[in-house]
Image (tube, rainbow, N blue to C red):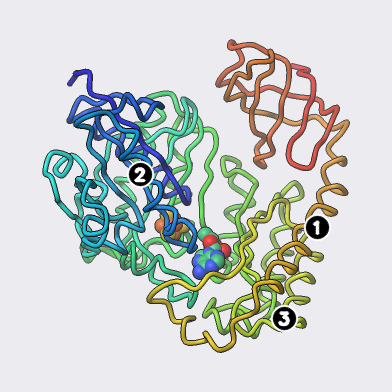
Amino acid sequence: MSSNKKLFIQTLGCQMNDTDSQHIQAELEKHKGYTATDKIEDADLIIINTCSVREKPVQKLFSEIGQFNKKKKEGAKIGVCGCTASHLGHDIIKRAPYVDFVVGARNISKIKDVVDVKGSVEVSIDNDESTYEFSTAKTNQYRASVNISVGCDKKCTYCIVPSTRGEEISIPPEMIVEQVRKSVALGAVEVMLLGQNVNSYGRRFSDNREKYTFTKLLQDVSKVEGLKRIRFTSPHPLHMDDDFIEEFARNEKISKCIHMPLQSGSTEILKAMKRGYTKEWFLNRASKMRELIPNLRITTDIIVAFPGETQKDFEDTLDVVNQVKFDQIFNFKYSPRPGTEALNLADKEIPDEIGSARLIELIELHKRHLEDTMPTYVGKTLNVLVESLKPNGEVCGFTDSYLQVFTKGSDELLGKFVDVKITEATRTSLKGEIIS
Ligand code: 5AD
Ligand code: SF4
């Protein structure tokens, strides 16, 4: 379908949201003839795909859509999608009547039905199989994202996600494999499997088929011919059983970078967060992985200043950080979220200045670790999938362990694997020369 209608999408939040935005774009291109633009002023449709996991994005939403309303061209529509849409629903249009439609995080597949219906609100979190069928989502020409489940069954006491994305339902493995095949046929060599909690995959399907496991799914996906690399996010440390870790270590297609969201290093706080594991379990899983996979990179999420977090609890977090030496940390200061259980702990909330100081201490510690670990790559030869061209005559790509590497090169390297001898390291990326 072709027309001159232009679509502008702004995406906040996590990788699930990035993929949802890619789906929104693909669906609206295919069914409604929109093409993407990065200029709000040119857009006939402006969509903001929101996140509600921390407080600021919600506050920002209304000022941002107000700005969009001022900048938009005459007659352009505004839609609000994603997690804040799920959680505020009709209130968005009540508070900002110029918003044309609202589509929740679990209802993205409805986008083509609502764009032309002024005032429509789709935020149900019931199961609906149409949510699985999408046009292909691509981050770039070589990387595709494929959802493997929707929703989340965990009850982490700080987290709003279960109320915005609903209960966890796994997408049937044959649909996932088919989606991966299609993406590879379109040129992808790497696939990112996405879910709120990927390694609890297979516990519940929308039909009453037999249970499945994430480990089996990884085996199925790795059989797709032409696929070179498999990545996934997010796994839950609690479900990192030996089977999973051994498959991760053995399967050469699986990228050797794993996200292990710690959240806290204190067993007491983990209990209050209802994470289901202890400090010792986390350390045991991380060291088993490091043992089996020598070049492994481990990334994590940490929340500081959860209600009741004492100095001793925080030191437990620093202790885990010191032992695991994470390769990347996404740090957050606790933010009370509506409808979550942790609100009951309001009387134990930690003063903001203490939270900020803890955040800084954690960031500084991690910086020191990176200053130790990153230079150890200098002199090594790493295999890199080249993905993009930089304006300064360099190309950029990622190693199997998802380290970003820059090197001199041109567009003929795009999509190819090359060996790069590393000559320089910063805290977050490497530079080197191609030797093959
Ligand atoms: N406050 C601060 N951080 C949070 N996260 C989730 N909910 C909250 C909250 N209420 C963080 C967690 C999660 C990441 C996506 O966001 O670390 O893993
Ligand atoms: Fe992603 Fe959670 Fe934010 Fe929703 S609330 S966009 S699931 S991080």
Residue type at numbered disc 1? Glu
Disc 2: which residue: 48
Q: Is residue 246 above or below residue 416?
A: below
Give the residue at x 48% y 51%: 14
In the image as oriented, which residue stretches furthest toward the left? Answer: 117
In the image as oriented, which residue stretches furthest toward the front? Answer: 70
Give the residue at x 59% y 10%: 412
Q: Quadrant of residue 399?
A: top right
Q: Quadrant of the C terminus?
A: top right
Residue type at numbered disc 2? Ile
Give the residue at x 49% y 62%: 54
Disc 3: which residue: 313
For residue 264, say whether it is visible: yes
Q: Position of residue 124 (x, y in %)?
A: 21, 62
Q: Residues within 10 Å of mark 1 (few under 14, many from 20)?
A: few
Q: Quadrant of residue 246?
A: bottom right
Query: Does dot 2 land on a helix, a strand or a loop?
Result: strand
Looking at the image, do the residues carrying marks 1 and 2 touch, with CB atoms under 8 Å apart?
A: no
Residue type at numbered disc 3? Asp
Q: Is residue 164 left or right of residue 209?
A: right
Disc 1: which residue: 364
Q: Is mark 1 within 8 Å of ligand 1?
A: no
Sequence order check, earlier mark of 1 and 2 = 2
Query: Does dot 1 land on a helix, a strand or a loop?
Result: helix
Q: Is residue 312 above or below residue 153?
A: below
Nearer the observer, 82 or 224: 82
Sequence order check, earlier mark of 3 and 1 = 3
Q: Position of residue 307 (x, y in %)?
A: 59, 81
Give the residue at x 76% y 18%: 434
Q: Is residue 257 left or right of residue 146?
A: right
